Image (tube, rainbow, N blue to C red):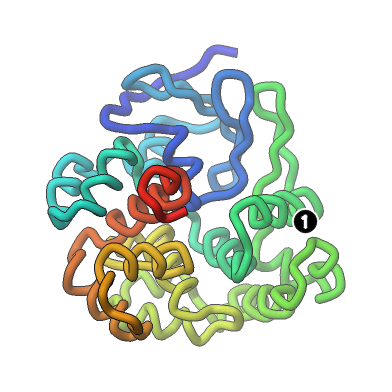
């Protein structure tokens, strides 16, 4: 099969797919097989270009945010040792533009789970309730729509290792499928309003809301704080303070990391997970 190509300067495919944003891409030959929306997609990187099949160059460029001025974004980061180390470690990592429902559903299932567990849950949901696609000799499954999930029972979802999250995912799917939660229209809301609407959904708290804002709505100020980031913030930015509240951390991140806080968070997060042995955060 002949692969198409698109220029991808200042981009690292492996780092981006392994950074805890998405959980369904699988190694396939020299690249990865996965799905973008309802399409099965194969993609591999050769230096400063991406070779792909299953979709268009426009979709690939949009999904991987190849239009983001990454060098400029990285220059905007605070100049401190923790952020500089994370920036250098994560060169080429970009924020992925994800389909809203898929992103929302995935992060509802991620609560109190490690990346390996989230990947398994995502795979199981896709295989049981999604549509199979053949791409580059591999079977991939697109994420089931909200309407499809809404038709399931809590017991069926629990069989996907969701535990208590099954109830929340089902309730939110029904809100979305019925139109009660119009995810697309929420794109017009301010950050504060959007976060508030998301937090009204079952299973969505501030951390999940910020993940969805960052990865699906492209609100690049959003700064999700999970246990990894909380640990990094306390160790690197509040080393002498014995107790730092969640509200204090949120206020600090909002002002200190600013307009590109989402990128800063993702770099700190990935560095903590993958480079932790070197920086003392593992």
Say whether residue 21 is left or right of residue 47: right
**Residue 73 in sight here:** yes
- Percent position of residue 249, x then y: 31, 77
- Percent position of residue 120, x then y: 71, 51
Image quadrant in which you'd find residue 31? top right
Say whether residue 104 is left or right of residue 64: right
Q: Secondary structure at mark 1?
A: helix
Say whether residue 176 is left or right of residue 244: right
- Percent position of residue 282, x then y: 47, 53
Up-down: is 265 above or below 210?
A: above
- Residue at (26%, 62%) from the top-left corner? 261
- Percent position of residue 126, x then y: 72, 51
Q: Residues within 10 Å of mark 1 (few under 14, many from 20)?
A: some
Up-down: is 235 above or below 15?
A: below
- Residue at (55%, 48%) from the top-left corner? 37
* Rendered-image quadrant of the N terminus: top right
- Residue at (47%, 50%) from the top-left corner? 273
- Residue at (45%, 73%) from the top-left corner? 207
How many labels, in total? 1
Residue, disc 1: 129
Up-down: is 184 above or below 242?
A: above
**Residue 96 in sight here:** no
Up-down: is 132 above or below 246?
A: above
Q: Nearer the viewer, residue 9 or 14?
A: 14
């Amino acid at each position: 099969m002949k692969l198409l190509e698109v220029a991808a300067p200042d981009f690292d495919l492996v780092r981006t797919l392994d950074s805890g944003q998405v959980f369904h891409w699988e190694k396939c030959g020299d690249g990865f097989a996965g799905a973008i929306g309802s399409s099965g997609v194969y993609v591999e990187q050769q230096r400063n270009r991406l070779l792909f099949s299953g979709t268009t160059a426009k979709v690939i460029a949009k999904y991987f945010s190849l239009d983001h001025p990454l060098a400029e974004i990285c220059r905007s980061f605070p100049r401190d040792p923790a952020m500089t180390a994370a920036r250098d470690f994560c060169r080429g990592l970009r924020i992925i533009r994800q389909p809203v429902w898929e992103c929302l559903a995935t992060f509802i299932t991620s609560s109190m789970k490690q990346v390996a567990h989230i990947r398994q849950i995502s795979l199981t949901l896709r295989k049981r309730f999604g549509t199979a696609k053949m791409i580059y000799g591999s079977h991939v499954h697109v994420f089931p729509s909200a309407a499809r999930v809404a038709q399931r029972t809590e017991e069926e979802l629990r069989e996907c290792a969701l535990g208590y999250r099954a109830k929340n995912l089902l309730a939110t799917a029904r809100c979305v499928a019925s139109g009660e939660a119009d995810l697309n229209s929420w794109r017009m809301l301010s950050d504060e309003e959007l976060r508030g609407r998301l937090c009204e959904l079952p299973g969505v708290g501030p951390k999940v809301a910020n993940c969805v804002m960052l990865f699906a709505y492209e609100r690049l100020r959003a700064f999700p704080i999970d246990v990894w980031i909380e640990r990094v913030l306390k160790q690197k930015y509040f080393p002498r303070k014995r107790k730092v509240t969640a509200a204090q951390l949120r206020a600090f991140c909002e002002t200190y990391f600013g307009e590109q806080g989402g990128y800063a968070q993702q770099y700190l997060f990935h560095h903590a997970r993958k480079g932790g042995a070197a920086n003392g955060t593992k």
